[in-house]
Amino acid sequence: MAQDIVMVVGLGNPGSDYENTRHNAGALFVEALAREAGQTLRPEKKYHGLYARIQWQGLDLHLLNPSTFMNRSGTAIKALADFFKISPEQILVAHDELDLPPGTAKLKKGGGHGGHNGLRDTIAHLGTNDFQRLRLGIGHPGDSRKVTGFVLGRLGKQETEQLTAVFDEVMRVLPDAASGKLAAAMNRLHSFKPTP
């Protein structure tokens, strides 16, 4: 069976200073997916990140959390994609999304970077924006001057619970999204409502 998604990347910043921050939502998702598959992400120098290859739900997936900083994510993504000859269209990049409320997620193919430095660098390194995205809602602080502090702030208890719930829902739809049923996966995921 041909897979539409072969590689799942979680954007985030490395190190304990950034652990469990909103900006690391993508990396937290990939860690959760690895755990779900009974695997652990391990440092892999040639891919500039933490890597695992999993067999899960009938899928063969390369998981990567770049250990570069967010604005250098493309280096790691391109290294792994080039090594395994994975086309940009087969890559799903999970990232935090200010424009979605906490506990929600949306799948999207293509598009701009929306000011997200990890996406900006990924587009620059891949030479295209034609990769898939998993947009993980973190909400917006309401004032553009507060965005940096907000995204680099640690997740609260309720936010963590909401992210965990949406991660579970993403994992339920990922097999469809990866195997030619993107519309069905999107319909289900986009109607998911966080628990208050």
Image (cartoon, grey):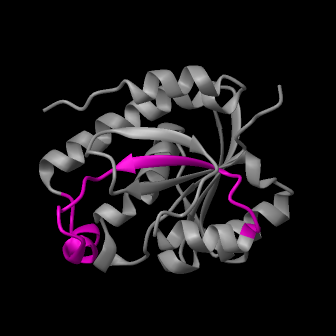
Residue 183 in the image: x percent, y percent? 60, 24
Residue 48, placed above or below residue 1: below
Quadrant for the C terminus in the image = top left
Q: Is residue 129 magenta?
A: yes
Left or right of 176 on screen, residue 86: right
- Residue drawn at x 23%, y 49% as measured from the top left: 160
Q: Is residue 196 magenta?
A: no
Q: Nearer the viewer, residue 170 or 122?
A: 122
Residue 144 in the image: x percent, y percent? 24, 71
Q: Which residues are magenta?
A: 126-155
- Residue drawn at x 74%, y 67% as measured from the top left: 126
- Residue drawn at x 83%, y 25% as measured from the top left: 1
In terms of image quadrants, where is residue 98? Answer: bottom left
Residue 8 in the image: x percent, y percent? 61, 50
Q: Nearer the viewer, residue 45 or 161?
A: 161
Residue 173 in the image: x percent, y percent? 52, 26
Left or right of 184 on screen, residue 147: left
Residue at the outermost right position: 85
Answer whether residue 57 is visible to the viewer in this image: no
- Residue drawn at x 28%, y 28% as measured from the top left: 193
Count of numbered labels shown in the rendering: 0
Residue 157, placed above or below residue 106: below
Answer whether residue 52 is visible to the viewer in this image: yes
Residue 43, placed above or below residue 109: below
